[in-house]
Image (cartoon, rainbow, N blue to C red):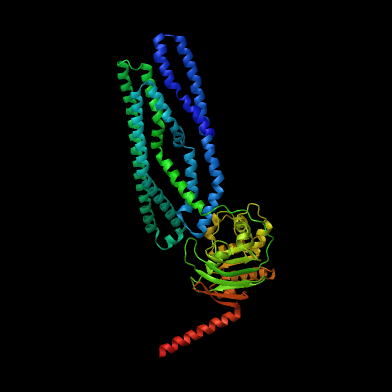
Amino acid sequence: MAIVVFSVFINALMLTGPLFMLQVYDRVLGSGSEATLVALSILVICLFLAMGVLENARGRVTAIVGARFQERLDRRVFVAAMQRSAVAPNDPTAMAAQRDLEAIRTFLASSVFLALMDLPWTPFFIAAIFIFHPLLGWLAIGGGIFLISVTTLNQILSKQPQKEAGLASVQSERLSDQLKNEAESLQALGMSKAGYDRWQVARRVALQRGIAATELAGGFGSMTKTFRLFLQSAMLGLGAWLVLQHQLTAGAMSAGSILMGRALAPIEMAVGQWPTAQRANEAWHRLSELLSHASPIPPRTTLPRPRALLEVERLTVGPPGEQGAILRMVSFRVEPGQAIGVIGSSGSGKSTLARALTGIWRPLGGTIRLDGAALDQYEPDVLGRLMGYLPQRMMLFDGTIAENIARLDAQADATQIVAAAKKADAHDMIVKLPNGYDTRISAAVSRLSGGQMQRIGLARALYGDPVLLVLDEPNSNLDNEGSAAMNAAIRAMKADGKSILIMAHRPAAIQECDLLLVLEGGMLKGFGPRDQVLRELVKNHTEVLKTQASGGVA
């Protein structure tokens, strides 16, 4: 509202120049009165000072509005982007979410936004020109129609090039990040040149499309500026002819030219700065699409700390946004103090089950209950603290080892951090590093082995005393010592009444499991005590081999 009020007074004060010109030509020069000139000059100085103050205030208000807009949406956009990235890694809409929000903020603080705020005043300035003479008014209207047509054409023709340029830029940045993250593999495999050549092609495409979009916008901007200057000269020429015909005064001629320049200035500004508005418009549509699929999570009633009782009933899970299910009609129950191993061939649905149990993927059907309450009755962050999760692909964040173990909690308790590290048998390994728990991952990651990173990840999963532990291939990078430490941590959690689920390929991972769940093609093919299920698997495998052998002999 303040911006509108400021715009009203600023555009009203824009009449100062034309009116001063009109008075000087028609009254001061005609009467030769120096006192009138001095009085008018003092008045004009005051009015222009007021206009400058208001213009500065309006600019500051728009900058504050843009900053507050971004501040209020920062968390919601960040959370929505995180939710989208969790279910669809490398999704372009999620990756560009913060840049899109920044583009909208930039637009709100830009001169093109102020030009759009001034645009509604163009008809009033043209109406003032009509007061001087109808021919001048019709000339201004014709010029305005032409500039508006150019603006519309600019919007239509530049939309696709701007979109392609932005997409190409995002793709080249994504490829650059991938190559930098895998620099070690590129060098080891002799792929550095091929990787650079591939990035260079993507970068060249982005530059070419960016140049094409810039040239198109620049061409329209030059056209509007040239035409506006010509139109002002045409207004002076027409005004001079009307003066010679004694239909107009010299003051009105000059005032009309100034008014027309002011009337068409917002249009020229909008055309010249249209890429900023175009980017903001595209960003708005992308953010609207992102936020429409990630509505704010309503507050939930805080539930008491649950027991480690996990019940899965007829669970069906598939990738978000897709109709097909990876996991179908799976049911099982885990009591407090039990560890269950989930085994099966690659692609059988083990990682999908882990994502569903931790709330990353929403079930297509069935329910998951923790101590009787469905998972969606817990706040996401609360559920995260109740569960310890070690993903199959271990990633650490830029920060200290202590911060990574504490899940980036700024108010973390050092005692709990050390306790979690000791449970994962990572304490001795950590204190041997140059700065111990304060070693920064960004500097140490190159000298940390996969097993060391996995043990730090296990410590992170154990931090905060979770009631349920979900481990996806937890010993894929561990040596015998690390596997023994993991099994010791599992025994300790079982003794403490916690539940553990382990998605495993290697037998050492299920050593401490009480139950085994067998998945095949996304379906439950076996569930029960570990030794019994293993015997059944061996028996079935033996029968299959005998059948194949007899078939081969036949």
Q: Residue at x 45, y 21 (%)?
A: 16
Could you tell me residue 166's position as x and y percent?
41, 48
Q: Nearer the viewer, residue 249 or 18?
A: 249
Instruction: Name the image quarter holding the C terminus.
Output: bottom left
Q: Residue at x 53, y 50 (%)?
A: 77
Instruction: Name the image quarter holding the N terminus.
Output: top right
**Is residue 424 among what the camera can see?**
no
Q: Nearer the viewer, residue 353 or 211?
A: 353
**Is residue 49 among what the camera can see?**
yes
Does residue 173 sit above or below 424 in this rendering? above
Q: Nearer the viewer, residue 538 or 204?
A: 538
Could you tell me residue 271's position as x and y percent?
38, 37
Image side of residue 125 versus residue 502, left or right: left
Does residue 506 sit above or below 96 in this rendering? below
**Numbered circles on residues, count:** 0
The answer to which image quadrant residue 269 occupies is top left
Could you tell me residue 523's position as x and y percent?
52, 73
Could you tell me residue 468's position as x and y percent?
63, 66
